[in-house]
Amino acid sequence: MKLLMWSAAPLVGVLLACSDRQSSARDSLAASDTGGAAAKRSLATPTARPAADSNARADAALERAARQTVRFLRGESPFDSLALADMVELRIAPEGGGAVSMVSRDALRDRSAWIVAGSQRRFSLVPPASYSTLSTKVSRHFNCQEQDLSTRAPDLAVRPHVGVRLQPVSPESCLQSWNATFVFKMVAGSPQLTAILYDQWEW
């Protein structure tokens, strides 16, 4: 009996050693998998981040251009601060008749030229002086409430655009809102105004 017990001890030691080696191998494999996943993430991140940064810069440039246009229309900044196409399309939303005017860049130096002549009315795109609260949003349209531009002008919605809304400090209703969407094209990475869609809560 003593001989049997003595001979079993080396066997237990061998089994324990094998178990330790298997556990070590599993730990090594897990560490390798974790390192591989981290490497994949580190490779993916540099590619995704520049694209996101580029989109953010483009959106910021569009919003600055829209706000600068509003400042000009309010008489707060000079015309030469704007980047306009040679011809700019001024359009009324379909509910207002859908009238369109093509106006040259030189003519738009005069704020009184920012007008769309419909069949029965003339619409000035110069906002009321008392409307001083400005809201802007890239890739959206305002008709008091925020919405998609494709609901008004699908052809303009595919281009870079910024929705703009002006209201009094304390508006009583959506009737007290000036709504327009500025449509741009990108020229050497900078936005150039090509069209404006004017909208109203009620026509």
Image (cartoon, rainbow, N blue to C red):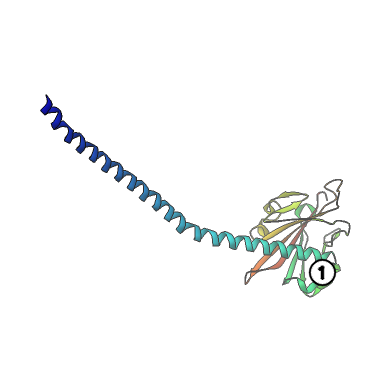
Q: Disc 1 designates what residue?
A: 77
Which residue is most to the top?
1
Residue at horizontal 78 percent and vertical 60 percent from the top? 99
What residue is at 18 percent from the left and 33 percent from the top? 9
How far across and how far down the image is residue 172, in percent?
87, 46
Q: Residue at x 81, y 65 (%)?
A: 71
The one of 150 and 185 positioned closer to us in this rendering: 185
State left or right for residue 174 relative to residue 136. right
| Amino acid at circle 1 | Ser
Identified at 82% across, 47% down, the residue is 174
Residue 195 seen in the current view:
no
Left or right? Give the position of 159 relative to 132: left
Above or below 52: residue 201: above
Residue 12: horizontal and vertical position, in percent?
20, 34
* Residue 65 lies in quadrant: bottom right
Quadrant of the drawing holding the N terminus: top left
User: In x, y percent, where is residue 164?
Assistant: 76, 57
Which type of secondary structure does the marked residue at label 1 adopt? loop
**Residue 190 showing in the rendered view:** yes
User: Viewer-proximal residue, 75 or 56?
Assistant: 56
Q: Position of residue 120 (x, y in %)?
A: 86, 58
